Amino acid sequence: MFRSKRPFCITLFLLVSCALSACENSRAASPQGPAAERWSQAHLEQVTATIQTQVEALRGEKYARPVDVEITDTRGFIEHATQRMAKLTTEAQLSAEEDVAKLLGLVPPEMDLWATTFAVLEGQVGGFYDPGNDTFYLMESFTGTLAKIILAHELTHALDDQLYDIDGTLKPLLKHRDRAAAFQAVVEGSGTAMMSQWMGAYGEPLSPAEAAQAASMGTESLSEAPPYVWKPLLASYTIGNTFLDRGYRMRKKDGLTFADVTRIAFQSPPRSTEQVLHPEKYWKESERDDPVQIELEIAPPADWKVLEESSLGELALTLMTEEPKEIDFSNPMALVFLKYTNAAARGWGGDSMVLLGSEEGRYLRVMTIWDSAKDADEFRAALEERLASWSRDVALLGEGGTVNLEPAAAAAPLAVSFSAWHGVSDAQLESLAKAVSVK
């Protein structure tokens, strides 16, 4: 459900954990020494050419052309990110995503979602590849081993882009939140897998200074942001990597290489985060589980319009139903052991979400379908547990704000539906409830 948060293929959270692991597992770290000088453009190009050759050797595939590389700073990142978001999405779509997040109770009512998102990205980004102009950008503060790790990750994105056209696949998926998140997991999973392989084959120990730099990357901005902002970003690295690794383990008996598995995932992406979270539901034909399509008939009343129609998916519903936990962000390794699904969200079959809006009001309707009545009951019970606090948050969004969890229906034991709204009169509410129905 997080289609707009990451305008680039970026190296952030997982790099920290992997880099620290490499440092801890190496035989010895380099001495502290003086602060490293920032790389020149010529040196960046030289190192890039070397790592491109190494990535080709590990992957068994060739770049079609050299990759443009540049050094940039935080201001440059923000400028590029802003321009890229403008190409991929609209202000109305960004506003709708914030509305949905707040109506689901995933973001505090007073929070500026996009300012918070950019604050997290600013503190975390080490480098980024922009598929829109086929260019890799290295943040100027990174040199030495850390910069090379970032290059290995981002140059994998460049290779995948040349082979499979990342933007060409992503753009049609952006209106489907869950499918876009699943594809982003493939993209970042590929980069993470190659980064790990590169570190094993060519990586050098981090110096104490580099380890300290990695450990301090943006932890303050993480601790100040809700999981909705940072957890899906981190998930794309971790569950994406696992998705490809498990796919390779399942399919190598058929003679497939890791590059073959990666190609399949790019050319025929998983259709949901459920398939990424549970790789057998994508890779094993006998267990293949594509999402159920809930086709809706939408007829907004006068002065109302459809602001968004999409799907949330298992990862988003996990965020809705998980218990808040304290995380020690000063310890990057703590991020490695995070969970991205739970009992309440497992067994997801499919869902449809519609956001309607008027000048003053917002109305969100979500319909879900589950694999079994037990799965539906578990999800409903989890929503009931947080209903009071969720309703209090929605009440702060505007006049009459509240949440309605629709009663269980004996005729539809696999279905769970709910609505959230504010700025809606009683008369409008009756019309809005009838405005969204299953075909």
Image (cartoon, helix red, strand yellow):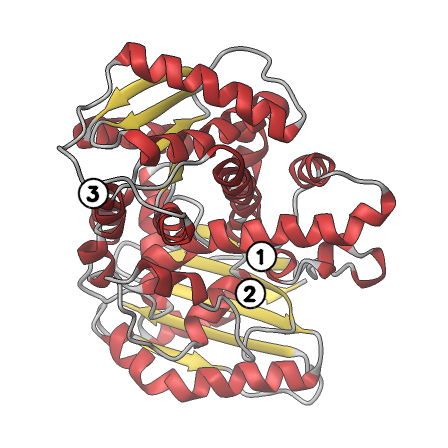
10 Å neighbourhood of mark 2: few (<14), some, or many (≥20)? many
- Residue 170, x across and y down, in percent: 54, 36
Left or right: 352 as drawn, with respect to 427: right
Q: Nearer the viewer, residue 271 or 431?
A: 271
User: Which residue lies at the image location 41% right of the left edge and 26% below the top edge?
Assistant: 130
Left or right: 88 as drawn, with respect to 71: right
- Mark 3 vs 1: CB contact within 8 A: no
Specify which label sits upstream in the sequence, 2 or 1.
Answer: 1
- Mark 2 vs 1: CB contact within 8 A: yes
Kind of residue indicated by mark 1: Thr
The residues bearing labels 3 and 2 have C-alpha atoms spaced at a distance of 39 Å
Q: Nearer the viewer, residue 229 or 123?
A: 123
- Residue 421, x across and y down, in percent: 35, 70
Kind of residue indicated by mark 2: Glu
- Compared with residue 132, is residue 358 higher up or lower down, i.e. above or below? below
User: Which residue lies at the image location 43% right of the left edge and 58% below the top edge?
Assistant: 355
10 Å neighbourhood of mark 1: few (<14), some, or many (≥20)? many
Residue beneath label 3, please?
A: 209
- Residue 368, x across and y down, in percent: 59, 70
Q: Quadrant of residue 379?
A: bottom right
- Could you tell me which secondary element the residue under label 2 belongs to? helix
Q: Is residue 366 visible?
A: yes
Q: Nearer the viewer, residue 316 or 265?
A: 265
User: Which residue lies at the image location 19% right of the left edge and 32% below the top edge?
Assistant: 74
Specify which label sits upstream in the sequence, 3 or 2.
Answer: 3
- Could you tell me which secondary element the residue under label 3 belongs to? helix
Residue beneath label 2, please?
A: 314
Residue beneath label 1, please?
A: 273
